[in-house]
Amino acid sequence: MNEIGLTPFLLLGAFLFACGVVCVAAKRNAVGILMGVELILNAANVNLVAFARFSTGFRLEGQVFALMVVVLAAAEAAVALAIILNFYNNHATVDVDKADELRG
Amino acid sequence: MLDWFQSVPGRLYVVGTLLPLAAFALLLIAGGVRALCRPFRQDGGFAGSLYWLCGGDVPLKTGAYVSTAFMGLAAVIGVAGLVIFLTDETTNTERAARWSERVDWLRLGPLETSSPPVWEKQREERSKQRRADPTRTIPEPPTPPTALALELGYKIDHLTAVVFAMVTVVGTLIFIFSLGYMKDETKEFVEDHEVTVAPAEGEPGAHGSHDRHPSLHAPGHGHDHHLKRRGRYGRFFLYLSLFCFSMLNLVIADNLFQVFVSWELVGVCSFLLIGFYYERPSASFAANKAFIVNRIGDAGFLIGILIAWTYLGTLNFEELNKRVRAPVEDSHRQLPFANEFVPVRTAKEPDRKGNPQLELPPKDEPGTHIALFPVSQIGHFDAPSTSGHGKTRPVPAQQTYTTYGAMPYWLFVVMGLGIFLGCVGKSAQVPLQTWLPDAMEGPTPVSALIHAATMVAAGVYLVGRAYPLFAPEVLLIIAYIGAITLFISASIALVQTDIKRVLAYSTCSQLGFMMLALGVGGWVAGLLHLITHAFFKALLFLCSGSVIYGCHHEQDLRKMGGLKSKMSITAWTMFVGVLAISGAPLLSGWYSKDMILSVSLAYAVIHPEHFLLFLLPAVTAGMTAYYMFRLWFLCFTGSPRDAHVHEHARESPWVMTLPLLVLAVFSVCVAWGWPLWNVEASYLGRVLHASEPVHMHDEFRALRIKEQDVHLLAGGLALGVAAAGAAIAFVVFFRKAPDANTLYATGPAWYRFLLRKWYFDEAYDAAFLKPTVQLAHLSAAADKRPTDTPHTPSEAEPPAKRFDFLTLDGFLNAIGQAMDTVGRALRSVQSGKLRAYVLALALTATVLLGMLAVLAK
C-alpha cells in the first residue's frame, strides 16, 4: 500500500484554513462566521494529527492536542451562539455589520 | 572627686560651662511642667500642686535666683580656674594634658590616631640608613590615613582662661542687675505701653481666668488698649542662661566645629532675647534682622569650615595650625621655614608612577599652592631646604584620600575670608553692622550681655583663635574692615540721640579697633581691648539701663539732662566708664587703646601705603571721647530738658547699683600692672602674650621693634586727640547746655547723613530687599492663571500673567493636546466592521509570516 506523505495533509489543512478565513472575512451572517471559525480550527486539527502521524516526536501530543481543540471548539461554539442569540434578541438581526456600536 | 580635678584641672571649666546649661534645663523643665499642669490648676491634686509649685499664675522668682546663683558659681570657677592656670608650674607638654581633653563625636576612619608600630619601626630603620649613607634615597614610609572626626573638646590656654573669667564675671553682674531691671516682669499682668491692640469686642471672661492664652489677653476696660500679658521673669533668665552657656562653650572649644555649634546657639539666643518683647513689631523686626544678617556671615563661616575639613582633614585648632605651617624641627635638625606658610607650585614632571609632584618655586616667585604638613610627624617630611631653589626633593602632591600634600593658595585665602566673614557678622563689622543698633530693642541687660561679654566678643575671639590660618592678604582685609568700621560707626555715634544707640555704635567702633589691631599684627593689643572693652562697655550699658529704669523707660537723650543730682551713683560710675572708653590714662581702656594705636602706627610706618590704618583710628579716638562725653553731659549735667522725666527720676535700687560699682572698679584696674604708667607692663597684657601664636614672634618682629620706637608718639597723639574731643564736647554740651530744640533730628546734609547711619539700611533696602520683593511679586504674577479658558491665552491679559501659561503650563498642555490628536487620528481604525478586522488580521499574519520566511533564509 502506497504511503501518502505529509505534504498532501498540510495542503489540505492550508486549503481548509484559507476557506475558513475567507468565510469569516466575507460573510455577514454571524452564524456563517462561526462556521468559518470552525473551519479554521479544523484546519489546525488536520495539521496536528498529520504531524502526529508523520513525525516521531509528537505521536501522542498531536492527537491529544487535536482532541483538545475539538473540545475548545465546542465550548467556543456554545459561547458564540449565546452571543449571537442575545444579539438577535436585541437587534432582530444577525448581520455583523450592524454590530458596530463600539466603533471609535 | 578632688583627685579628678587635681589630675585634670581643665575639667573645672567643663563644670563652669555646664552650670548655666543646668540652670537653663531646670527653668525649662519647670516651665514645661507648669504648662502641662495648667488645666488642673483649680484641682487640689498632685498636678494642681505641681502647677503652683512651678510658678502658678504669677512668675516665680526662684528660677531667676537659681540661674543667677549658678552663673555666680561659674564666675567663681572662672576666676579660680584662671588663678590655678596661671600658677600652674608644669611644663608645656604636661600642661596640654592637664588642660585639654577631646572626645569623639563622630568619626569616619581609623580609630587610632597614633601611628602603628610598623611605621615607627620603618622610621627608625630609615633614620639609621640615612645616618649610614646620607646620599642614598630611601623610600618614604606611608603616611597613615587621617581620620575625619568631629570632636568635642576643650583646651584652656591663657586667652581662654582670661576670656572665660571675663565672660562669667561680667555675666554674673549682668544677671544680678537683671534681677532688679526686670522687676516689672514678675507681675501677673504686665502692660506693654508700646503695643496697642485692637479692643476685643465682647470678649467673655475679661480677666481670663479660663483663657487659654492669658499672655495675649487684652482686657476690655480702660480707654487705651495696651497689650497685657503675663510677666516673663523666668523666661528672661532662661534665655540668659542658655546665652551664657553657648558663649562659654564657644570659648573653651578646641575645634572649629564646636565653635560653629555654639556660634549658632549664640545666634538663636540673641534672636530670642532681642525679640523678648516680641509683641512690639520693632522688636520682632530687629530680632529677625539680627538673625538673618548673622546667617550671611555664618554662610561664609561654614564655607571656611568646609574648606578646612576637605583639605586639612581636621577642625582642631592646634592641628590646623600644624597642617598649614611648617614644623619647627624634626628629630634631626632645625628645619627651615619653621612656623611659616610654605608656598609651592606644581612640578612640571610627575614622579615615576605619574603622580603629580610639588616643588619650591624659584626665589621671588609666588607659589600657586601652600604646602600642608602631616599633623603627627610620622615618616619624615622633607621640608624643602632653602639652598638651591627648585632642586629640592619634591613633595608628593596627594597622599591619601583626605590628606593632601598641598592646597591651592586662593582656596586657603577663601577659607580665611570665610571664617572672617562669620566674625564680621557676629562682631557687627561693615558691611554687616546694621543689625547691632537695632538689637537695642531688647531689654538693656541683654544689650549689655550681647555688646560686652558674649556675642560680639565671639567674633573677635574667633579671629584671635584662628589667627594662624589667616594668610597675609586676609589679615590686611581684616585690618581695613576694622578701620572702616571704627570710623563709620564712630561718626554715626556722634549725632545719635537715643542713649542706647550711641552706645551701640560705640560698640561697633570699638570692635573695629580690635579687628584693626588683629589685622595689623597686634594680637595682644586686640584681645586686651576685647577684655577691657567688655568691662567698661558692660558698665556703660548697665549705667544706661539704670538711667532708663530710673526715668521710667525713657531713652531719649533730648528729654534727659541734670540727672546727676538724682542718681549720683549711676552718674559717677558711668563717668568712670566714659573715661575708660575715651582712653584716659591709667584706666583700663588707656592700656589697650594705646597698644592698638602704637601697633597700627608701627604698621603704617613700615607700610606707608597703608597710612589710613593709623589715620582712621587716631581720628576716631578723638571722636570716641567726643561722643561719650556728649552722652554723659547731655544725660547728667545742665538743666532738665523734660520736667516730667526729671521729676520722676530716681536712683535705682542697690541690686542694680552694686554691679555698677563692681564693674567700675574692674574698668579702672583690670589692665593694671607694675609700673602703672607703663602700658607694656600691663599684667593682663603679659598673660595674653603668653598664648600668642608662636609664629608671630618671627613674622612680626620688625613690627615689634618699630612699635617700641613709635610708642610714645602714638600714645601722646591718641591722648591729645581724645583730650581735644572731650574738650569740644565740654564746650558744646556743658558750657552751653543746649536745649532740646537744638538737638532735634534736623540739620545740614552731613548731619542727616550721619543721623541716617550713612544710609546703610536704605542702601540695603534698595539693593537687596526691594529687588527680592519685586522678584517675588513678579513670580507670583507669572503664576496667576488667566481668567478665561485654559487653551487660549487671551491677548488682553498682561504678559506677565501669560508667561507661566506659555512656558511651563504650555509645555504640559502641549503633551496633553498631542495625545488628544493622536487618539482622534486612530479612532477611524476602530471602525466596528468585523470583516475589516479579519482582513487586517489575515493580512498582518501573512505579512509577518512572509517576513519570517524571508528573514529565516
Image (cartoon, coloured by chain):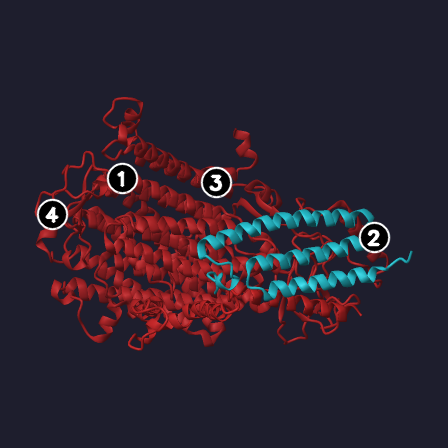
Chain colours: A cyan, B red
> How much space separates mark 2 and mark 3, taking CA atoms?
102 Å
Instruction: Identify residue type, mark 1.
Output: Tyr
Q: Position of residue B477 (x, y in %)?
A: 46, 68
Disc nearer the start of the sequence (3/4): 3
Residue corresponding to mark 4: B648
Q: Position of residue B737 (x, y in %)?
A: 14, 62
The answer to which quarter of the image holds residue B599 is bottom left
Q: Which residue is mark 1?
A: B233
**Which residue carries the number 2 mark?**
A53
Q: Earlier in the sequence, mark 4 or mark 1?
A: 1
Q: Assess disc 3: are there few (<14), some (14-19) or many (≥20) residues with their C-alpha within 10 Å of its C-alpha.
A: many
Please give the name of the residue rendered at 36% of the width and 45% of the height, measured from the top-left corner.
B170
Q: CA distance from mark 3 to mark 4?
A: 45 Å
- Judging depth in this view, the residue of B104 and B343 nearest the camera is B104
Image quadrant in which the C terminus of chain B is located:
bottom right
- Chain ID at mark 1: B
Circle 3 chain? B
Mark closer to the observer (2, 3): 2
Mark 3–mark 1 contact, CB under 8 Å?
Answer: no
Q: Amino acid at mark 2?
A: Arg
